[in-house]
Image (cartoon, rainbow, N blue to C red):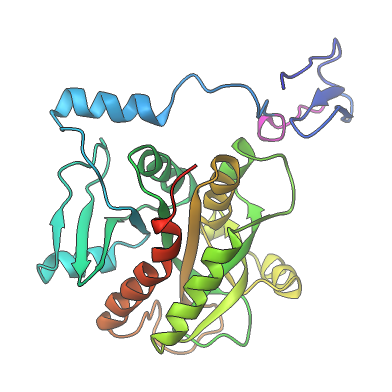
């Protein structure tokens, strides 16, 4: 669907979600709300992947079917330190390195420090064209729901779209849903691992240093459990492309928390969590794509 431009560009605008909308005279419409979502992109993730292979001599080959985006990078660093991962030689990316973790029949690729929605989706797009069938974000989060203990885990099944990337993939709306079956499977397997977990709504923001008391209170009333920086972006990518994408938020801080700040628990918790994520992803990863 192409954008239709009015002769009075300061008064009328078109969004990808519908017909021209009326703005106040002289008020510019934010480009974020006026994308032609059905127009083809001129730059594709496959083009970037092929450029990396050509420039860096990376041979074409498979990457793990299950891949994890490790927001903080703490888990990736610990696995590297322990010698429990190896580089993925087939991963073609200018910006990141992928590590492969294996334990018994379970395996996944993991990339550290995929911070924020734009970066997480950029990497997820490349994972998908390289053959990843399940992508799970492992996010750092702040507590919004007052009943949540710290540390604890939230499996996001929907996200408030207070960020930018999702609007490049879907028409404007307050929320976006996660792929339902994967979210359920993540909650089940994390609970079976004995880790404290809830499934529900999260608030995705691009600006953690602009989280206000009013915003926190409003989103808490709406039922949000935690605030993080990538769920809405990743879920919009999933909805647009059909990718199987999940998000697990590690809730480690809150303005009213009196204990240690940014507490994720014992380092071994991350390894147990990774095992649970890989187990939950086995069903979707075993299905034929398409």
Q: Tell me where residue 189 appears, x and y as whole percent.
A: 44, 78
Look at 21% across and 39% down and name the residue there.
Answer: 61
List the single residue furthest toward the top. 7
Visible in this render: residue 172? yes
Main SS class of the magenta portion in the image = loop
Q: With 74 as the anchor, is 169 left or right in this view? A: right
Quarter of the image for the N terminus: give it. Answer: top right
Query: From what the image shows, is residue 5 above or below residue 139?
Result: above
| Magenta-colored span | 27-34
Look at 74% across and 53% down and name the residue there.
Answer: 174
Q: With 167 as the anchor, is 257 left or right in this view? A: left
Query: From what the image shows, is residue 127 above or below residue 13?
Result: below
List the single residue furthest toward the front. 288
Query: From what the image shows, is residue 157 above or below residue 98?
Result: below
Visible in this render: residue 206? no
Task: Let me know if residue 268 is in the magenta part.
Answer: no
Q: How many marks are shown on the rendered structure?
A: 0
- Kindly indicate the quadrant of the structure image that contains residue 77: bottom left
């Amino acid at each position: 669907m192409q954008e239709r431009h009015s002769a009075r560009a300061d008064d009328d605008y078109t969004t990808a979600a519908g017909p021209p909308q009326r703005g106040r005279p002289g008020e510019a419409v934010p480009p974020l709300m006026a994308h032609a979502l059905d127009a083809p992109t001129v730059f594709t993730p496959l083009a970037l992947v092929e450029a990396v292979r050509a420039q860096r001599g990376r041979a074409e080959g498979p990457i793990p079917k299950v891949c994890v985006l490790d927001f903080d990078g703490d888990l990736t660093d610990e696995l590297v330190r322990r010698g429990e991962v190896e580089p993925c030689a087939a991963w073609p990316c200018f910006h990141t390195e992928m590590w492969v973790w294996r334990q018994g029949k379970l395996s996944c690729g993991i990339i550290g420090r995929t911070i924020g929605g734009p970066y997480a989706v950029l990497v997820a797009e490349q994972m998908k064209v390289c053959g990843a069938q399940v992508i799970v974000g492992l996010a750092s989060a702040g507590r919004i729901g007052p009943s949540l203990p710290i540390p604890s885990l939230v499996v996001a099944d929907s996200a408030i779209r207070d960020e930018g990337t999702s609007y490049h993939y879907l028409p404007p709306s307050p929320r976006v849903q996660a792929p339902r079956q994967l979210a359920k499977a993540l909650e089940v397997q994390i609970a079976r691992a004995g880790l404290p977990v809830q499934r529900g709504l999260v608030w995705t923001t691009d600006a953690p240093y602009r989280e206000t008391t009013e915003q926190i209170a409003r989103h808490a009333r709406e039922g949000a459990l935690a605030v993080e920086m990538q769920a809405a972006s990743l879920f919009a990518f999933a909805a647009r492309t059909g990718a199987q994408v999940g998000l697990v938020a590690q809730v480690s801080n809150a303005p009213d928390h009196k204990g240690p700040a940014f507490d994720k628990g014992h380092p071994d918790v991350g390894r147990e969590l990774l095992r649970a994520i890989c187990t939950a992803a086995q069903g979707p990863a075993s299905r034929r794509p398409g």
